[in-house]
Image (spheres, coloured by chain):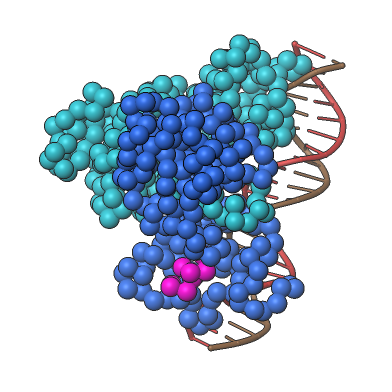
Chain colours: A cyan, B blue, C brown, D red
Amino acid sequence: MPSPRNKLQALPSRDVPAVVVSRLSLYLRELRQLVREGRSTVSSSQLGKLLGVTDAQVRKDLAYFGHFGHPGIGYRCDELIAEIRRILGTDRSWIVTMVGVGNMGRALLRYKGFAEQGFRIVAAFDSDPRVVGTKIEDIPVYDTSELRNVIRQQKIQLGMITVPATQAQQVADQLVTSGIVGIVNFAPVTLSLPEKIGLVGVDLTTELEQLAFSVANRNVRR
Amino acid sequence: MPSPRNKLQALPSRDVPAVVVSRLSLYLRELRQLVREGRSTVSSSQLGKLLGVTDAQVRKDLAYFGHFGHPGIGYRCDELIAEIRRILGTDRSWIVTMVGVGNMGRALLRYKGFAEQGFRIVAAFDSDPRVVGTKIEDIPVYDTSELRNVIRQQKIQLGMITVPATQAQQVADQLVTSGIVGIVNFAPVTLSLPEKIGLVGVDLTTELEQLAFSVANRNVRR
DNA sequence: TCGTGTGAAGTGATTCACAGCG
DNA sequence: CGCTGTGAATCACTTCACACGA
């Protein structure tokens, strides 16, 4: 293979399957747990066993991005954590907003896990005058009409959408024209966005449907 | 191909890739939208375009489960909705519980979307005496010590876990020994469960990490 | 010796392309 | 003629198996 042996190679060595990236997140989660337990190194087979994947898969996944392992030793946990964070782009912090301060939005605003991984929610938006002007966990709630101004002034990069399905596309369009580069959509609709904009959809009903299927038909492997 | 030409064939015609099932949920979502707009039929290419998949993919996905289309016509929306619901197992209703009534749990208890798709949350559990005994959207909150009794008495089938990561495995074990058959885990840990138990994990931090990656590296297709 | 990194082989999913039906 | 259902071909991902480094 080409790609020189410098360990800090440029990131997008080649087109990476999305499923590999999703496993990276899981590796990261396990590595943090291992560190909490006092482990300093881990082998691909150990890490794989924790997640139900093969050792070869772990190594191949990581090899998309560089040479992080130490033959005979395995991977140093803290080192690999740093590498994966760099790969995912969570070594820096991201400035995030939330549009929709209903039940779901409020719950997410109060969730501490985001900040721990470098996602700083700095503003929220809603159209209900009863919440506009309030703060939730120190995060100010603005009227939706302020969307563009606030996003530009605060240099917000990512948006989370927790408005009703009927409004989600319109909100997404506003986010895009305000300069946001990525969206997590919790509304149960398919958004259509410019290619350039990153998009992740989370539909909780869909998740329950997957579960119902796997229970109703005991013939899927996860 | 074997499999006789009766349209209502037995469900698990063969081992179905998980990704096919997840698209089924999305087809369902689009079909409902189409019906709302007054459409009565849809072709595989139209349905595919709405979701960014090919027409062949739509047809192949559905063909895992039967012959639902009408050559020259397409698929009748209401018919296909019924078929997909039957396949997913959401034509009947599921009895669900929620363990953990923090921010996330409360938000999900208040979310109306679940009931609409046949998921009836009938009980919630927490260990905080301030919420035990209260009701959220008419759903009673019991002390966690009551878990087994309530699950058995109410014949609860599915559980959603929204407790802190440190307690998730223990809660999952309790759910399993109480007779639950499927779990949606919102805690950011990998659960280990018996093969027989259905499991879907939703980790919101992980989702944001996927987004960060796709924004930081503009080389993934979704 | 243990465990990584990686070509090669194998498996699985997607797309192609077309016969056949309404 | 439009559109499904589906083998065959292609493309993508995973696993195998082994050379090599510490």
Residue at the spot 61% in from the left edge and 37% down from the top edge:
B177
Q: Residue at image x 70%, y 25%?
A: A46
Q: Which quarter of the figure has residue A127? A: top left
Majority secondary structure in the magenta region? helix
The answer to which image quadrant residue A21 occupies is: top right
Does residue A136 belong to the magenta stretch? no
Left or right of A117 in this view: B89: right
Number of numbered discs: 0
* B78 in the magenta segment: yes
* Residue B25 visible in image: yes
Residue beneath the point at 63% across and 33% down: B192
Q: Is residue B35 above or below residue A34?
A: below
Q: Nearer the viewer, residue B19 or B86?
A: B86
The image position of residue B9, as x and y in percent, is: 64, 72
Q: Which quadrant of the figure contains the N terminus of chain B?
A: bottom right
Q: Is residue A96 visible?
A: no
- Residue A192 rendering spot, x and y as whole percentages: 36, 53
Q: Nearest the camera: A125 or B6?
A: B6
Task: Measuring from the top left, give residue D15's x and y in whole percent.
Answer: 76, 40
Percent across and percent down for residue B116 are 38, 57
Q: Describe residue B104's horizontal placement relative to residue A65 as left or right.
A: left
Q: Which residues are magenta?
A: B77-84
Question: In the rendered view, would you say B102 is above or below A207?
Answer: above
